Amino acid sequence: MDWMYTLSGFLVGLIVGVTGVGGGSLMTPLLVLMFGVSPATAVGTDLLYASLTKTLGGWVHGRNGSVDWKVVGLLGMGSLPAAVVTIALLKYLVLDEKTLRGLVTGVLSVALLLTAAALLLKDQIKKLARRADGTVYELHHRYLPAATITTGAVVGTLVTISSVGAGVLGTVALLFLYPRMSAVKVVGTDIVHAVPLTAIAGMGHLALGTVDLVLLVSLLLGSLPGIYIGSHLSAKVPEKVLRPILATMLLIIGLKMVFYK
């Protein structure tokens, strides 16, 4: 079965490399629906998988200067404590397997549907940030730090429970909060912020016993070359074709997760 995990890791890595969409929105439901991995273990394993795969991308963006470190810090001020608190609550509540499965699949299905909507409405969201004269709506600088920290806290909680949200949802939030930020810097900032978030959340799940290390290694063996190849193909595949296909796929998966038992 290990080679199937590796093949799945390669395919997800390839899609992530081409589209830039976070692997959590694909890998976690794939592990649950296709391989029958328990939702909590799928989330925990995927979080550590994401932290390792995003580290390389974050390093590249950092070297290229396409990261707003101040925004990364503000997001982290909200997301990292939120991840720790969420893990602590999961440990304190000592949920039985059925309740934990229901919590994870419920949050996961909502996160997938939100991600699908964000992908489909990405262009409309960009237009909402602009006035008729072409200037952009901006939150007053006095409220921007608090709004960024709050956004980080919401994303941190969502990611810790479902492993989904650090990619598309984080990017959409940054587009709203910082409409003047260049697209490459939005992506770079979001990826760098996701590295410590997924690492802390993943280590928390490891402490809870909801990480399969053998599965993690099998996924990485496939995903790392997949991401490498996909990143080289990304310029050749039109985003306008890929985005609706990917969004439709996430919508179907999200609806399947709603009725998962």
Image (cartoon, rainbow, N blue to C red):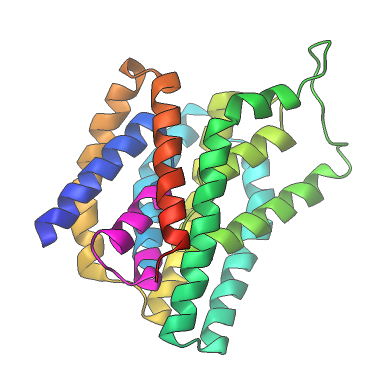
In the image, is 78 to the left or to the right of 226?
right
Q: Which x, y percent locates residue 201? A: 48, 66
Q: Main secondary structure of the magenta part?
A: helix
The answer to whether 53 is drawn above or below residue 80 in the figure is: above
Q: Which x, y percent locates residue 257? A: 43, 60
Locate the C terminus by quadrant.
Answer: bottom left
Q: Nearer the viewer, residue 84 or 246?
A: 246
Q: Which x, y percent locates residue 40? A: 40, 72
Judge whether residue 206 can be spotted in this image.
Answer: yes
In the image, is 218 to the left or to the right of 98?
left
Question: In this view, which residue lies farthest toward the top?
Answer: 133
Judge whether residue 166 can be spotted in this image.
Answer: no
The image quadrant of residue 133 is top right
Q: Quick check: is 30 in the magenta stretch?
A: yes
Q: Which x, y percent locates residue 209? A: 36, 80
Q: Nearer the viewer, residue 230 or 108?
A: 108
Q: Residue at x 73, y 55 (%)?
A: 150
Q: Residue at x 23, y 42 (%)?
A: 11
Residue stretch in magenta = 24-43
The answer to whether 203 is drawn above or below residue 249 in the figure is: below
In the image, is 140 to the left or to the right of 111?
right
Locate the N terminus by quadrant.
Answer: bottom left
Q: Residue at x 54, y 75 (%)?
A: 87
The image quadrant of residue 130 is top right
Q: Nearer the viewer, residue 46 or 196?
A: 46
Q: Quick check: is 41 in the magenta stretch?
A: yes
Question: In this view, which residue lies farthest toward the front?
Answer: 259
Q: Residue at x 38, y 53 (%)?
A: 50
Labels in figure, total:
0
